[in-house]
Amino acid sequence: MLNEQEIREVVGQLIDPTIERSLADTNGIRDVRIKGDYVSLKIALAQAGSGEQLTLQQEIVKELKEKGFKTVGLRFEALGDHGIQAATTPSILKPESGTTFIAIASGKGGVGKSTVSVNLAVALARAGKKVGLIDADIYGFSVPDMMGIETRPTVVNDRIIPPERFGVKVISMGFFVEDNAPVIWRGPMLGKMLNNFFSDVEWGDLDYLLLDLPPGTGDVALDIHSMLPSCQELIVTTPHATAAFVAARAGAMAIKTNHRLLGIIENMAYFESKVTGEKEYVFGSGGGEKLSEALKTDILAKIPLGQPYANESDFAPSIYRDDHPFETHYNELAARVIEKVEG
């Protein structure tokens, strides 16, 4: 029959299903009592009372009965914020990491949020900053293709090494699915993948970690807001009144979760003719100003509508470079972001 220490060693190897850390790591075995062939344990979990708790309960009973106990009594309680933070906070999320998190959000799809994300990341790198980018739009991942990244992450000593392009380290769900397959997952599974992006990726020393959020205010955006202790946020809209109206919801979420609004980026603000130089306001005008007024924050940039230059020998279909006029817009945006964060 096992003694208390041996029981702790056996049960401690089992995994808290919500945060995917062992009970030994989380100090989740709170009490062990033995009386003959009866053993009683109190277990603390990150999410007590869930369906996954039942599976863990069965695993504990099975392990201990195989060791000779006839009866196993279990009680469960919440691990509590202190226990989770002490055991599971990834180094990149700790205040001493010195990394500034910038979430890039929109109220709806189709406003060019991911285009803004990748080009802002590249512009920050051009400004001499150490930059990472998380493609947190797990259902609609597009960052690897937009940046022309064809290599996948490597694994060294159980740590994921993200690929790097244009001076930006990138991680995306797109690296972990085959042939552009759809992701058919429920909310909790998405939350675990996002947690892995923070905890299992070797980001190194970063000045900025950008997060390309999915549009709207769904589960993934909520998970991001709850995971990050401190975060800046940029809201992307077009000049269209409806796009600005729904973008206000994303801004309101940032405010309610105590994240700081850095400002607004009005994308596709106008189209400028190469022939005449005239500006045509294809999607109307005034949306950025209305959103700025509603959220009481600044418009940091108005990005025109136009394609990057094609470069078949160096594929990166959404990055403005090679002296493209829009490169200047993103360099100026990066300078304003740096000024607001560091100034």
Image (cartoon, rainbow, N blue to C red):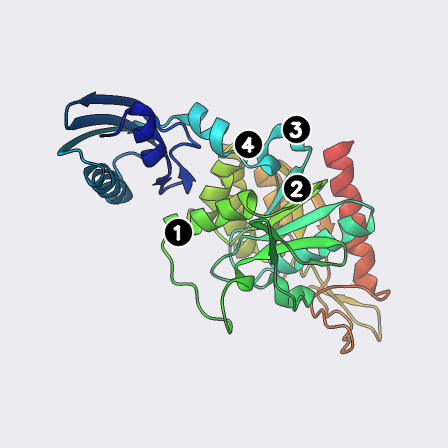
Give the mark nearer the N terminus: 3 vs 1. 3
Q: Secondary structure at mark 4?
A: loop
Nearest the eye: 107 or 155: 155
Dot 1, how many residues are within 10 Å of its Cα: few (below 14), some (14-19), or many (20+)?
A: few
Q: Residue at x 55, y 32 (%)?
A: 229
Q: Looking at the image, is 172 positioned above or below residue 10?
A: below
List the single residue furthest toward the right.
Answer: 323
Disc 1 designates what residue?
189
Label 3 or label 2, whichever lies nearer to me, is 3
Label 4 or label 3, whichever lies nearer to me, is 3
- Image label count: 4
Q: Quadrant of residue 234?
A: top right
List the single residue furthest toward the front.
Answer: 1
Disc 3 designates what residue?
96
Q: Position of residue 102 (x, y in %)?
A: 63, 42
Q: Are marks 2 and 1 in contact (CB under 8 Å)?
A: no
Q: Position of residue 16 (x, y in %)?
A: 36, 39
Disc 4 designates what residue?
229
Q: Looking at the image, is 30 positioned above or below residue 9?
A: above
Residue type (three-letter) at the residue carrying disc 1: Met
Q: Residue at x 72, y 45 (%)?
A: 300
Give the mark nearer the N terminus: 4 vs 1. 1
